[in-house]
Image (spheres, rainbow, N blue to C red):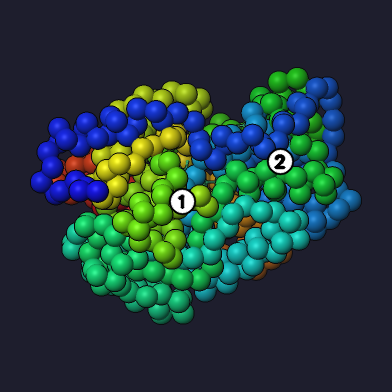
Amino acid sequence: MAGLSPSDTSCEIFMLVDRALANATFHPFWLDRRDAPSPEAPLIGRTEADLLIVGGGFTGLWAAIIAKESNPSQEIALIEAENIACGASGRPGAIVSTSVMHGLHNAVRVFPKDIAMLETLGQANIAGFLDTLDRHGIDCDAEWNGELTVAVGTANLPTLREEYELQQRHGHDVVLLGPEETRRELASPLFEGGLWAKKNSGTLHPAKLAWGLKRAALALGVRIYEHTPLRALTDDGDTVTAETRDGKVRARRVLLATNAFAAGHDHIKRRVAMVRDRILMTQPLTDEQMGRIGWRNRQGVYDTRTQLNYMRLTKDNRILFGGRLGYFYGSPRDPRLDRTPAPYGRLAEAFFRTFPQLDDVEFTHAWSGPIGLTTRMAVHFQTYHGGKVVYAGGYSGFGVSASRFGADIGLAKLTGSQRPELDCDFARTMPGTIPPEPFRYLGARITMYALDTAEAKGGWRNLWLKLVGKLGFPLS
Ligand SMILES: Cc1cc2nc3c(=O)[nH]c(=O)nc-3n(C[C@H](O)[C@H](O)[C@H](O)COP(=O)(O)OP(=O)(O)OC[C@H]3O[C@@H](n4cnc5c(N)ncnc54)[C@H](O)[C@@H]3O)c2cc1C
């Protein structure tokens, strides 16, 4: 293949993008499987439970398993508005990390006092994650080949070195790569350096994970009701009653695992904004096409662009390429709203500029998913109804493994456990509030425009991103 050259004009790129997207279906690749389990019946009528979990993504499923395994005699019900994994959990890039706080750098930014504890908890979380997969025989195509952060251009090389030194100080197994070494790992003319964190991180198939967790929870005796949206919660004193579309659950404790949907209490949205992030999936690459990019070590990859892109391989050698944020007024939950081709075209353009040698590759799937964004950029916990209801969520796009940690800490808060980590800032404090609509919409739109153009045009865009940074979001 001749491939694109850096001098290729926009017109040539647009034609390429149009051709590559022509046959793409707007549906998550992960959920497009014949072996998807059929949904559990909805709740019709009244029931009772010791613990009610609202939300059937990773957080809810992990919570169901952890709670049932720690006390098998308790009655646990899980209600899900639609299908298991219909939210973020069936839609991510699914690059898995040991960090439970969106990376070490972010953990140091938000919780400098808690670092030693967070590092220990991150390791324990991955150990518990692997142990559950093993005990319940969950096959989710996991590959533990590490995470590679690649510098696009030379401007971010100092940041990469700082991150390397930080990770080394905390005993992580990391390697700093020069431009040639980086391109030997993954061939792109854009990459000028890389940082490869080798241990306890990698990639997996998120829907297979969610469905495996569902199977495990059912086998343990958890009652799962799908197509059962929570409508309202009423405090009855010693218990809480959850009203659903066709029934009611009276429960002693409720865990709200509703992440970006922020459902369960009106106040959750004050600290959680739903943005959508978009992903493209290619057809399986041939051995010859794979030869053009290398990627023999198959790491999960993030780049350092202001509008970040992430990429990974699937088991059958497709490339998943993600990272194009969008915001919809009022955060509607229906993903069909995001089936307009234009934003995916911009993402495809970034793909071909990253891998110009793959100009004969087509995309089979394009989709978006909801990200629960907070100023903390990581999970937090909100408590309601005198401690009988806890919300755990807001992973800010980094929750495939951290959701197990979020479930665990959320349950510990709910049961009034004396575990020492509950005294740490990350468990006690809240992220900042985010302005309501219409300011949220306006702010999000300006921010996304600034993110897109900051690298090329700078000026007011950098100032705006710094201002948003002052609100707590580390974007610039
Ligand atoms: C495009 C994209 C890419 C991502 N990439 C990565 C990545 O590479 N690595 C990583 O670590 N993380 C990634 N993430 C983040 C990760 O997917 C999430 O943090 C994680 O899946 C959150 O799980 P959850 O269970 O908390 O939320 P969800 O999976 O969103 O589950 C919440 C559930 O609550 C249900 N619900 C909402 N309201 C109600 C109601 N009223 N009644 C009943 N149920 C309700 C929803 O239907 C939903 O199923 C990505 C996310 C997206 C969207």
- Amino acid on which disc 1 is placed: Asn
Q: Quarter of the image holding residue 433?
A: top left
- Amino acid on which disc 2 is placed: Ile
Disc 1 element: loop
Residue at position x 62%, y 52% in the image: 140
Q: Judge whether 376 appears above or below 326 on screen.
A: below
**Numbered disc in front, either 2 or 1:** 1
Disc 2 element: strand
Residue at position x 71%, y 20% in the image: 245
Question: On the rendered structure, is 224 left or right of 277?
Answer: right
Of the numbered discs 2 and 1, the one sitting upstream in the chain is 2
Q: Residues within 10 Å of mark 2 (few under 14, many from 20)?
A: many
| Percent x, y of residue 17 | 27, 34
- The Cα–Cα distance between marks 2 and 1, rounded to whole angstroms, is 36 Å
Residue at position x 43%, y 69% in the image: 197
Question: On the rendered structure, is 31 left or right of 15?
Answer: right
Q: How many marks?
A: 2
* Quadrant of the picture in which ligand 1 is shown: top right
| Percent x, y of residue 67 | 76, 52
Residue 317 is marked as 1
Q: Quarter of the image holding residue 89?
A: top right
Instruction: Return the residue at label 2.
Output: 53
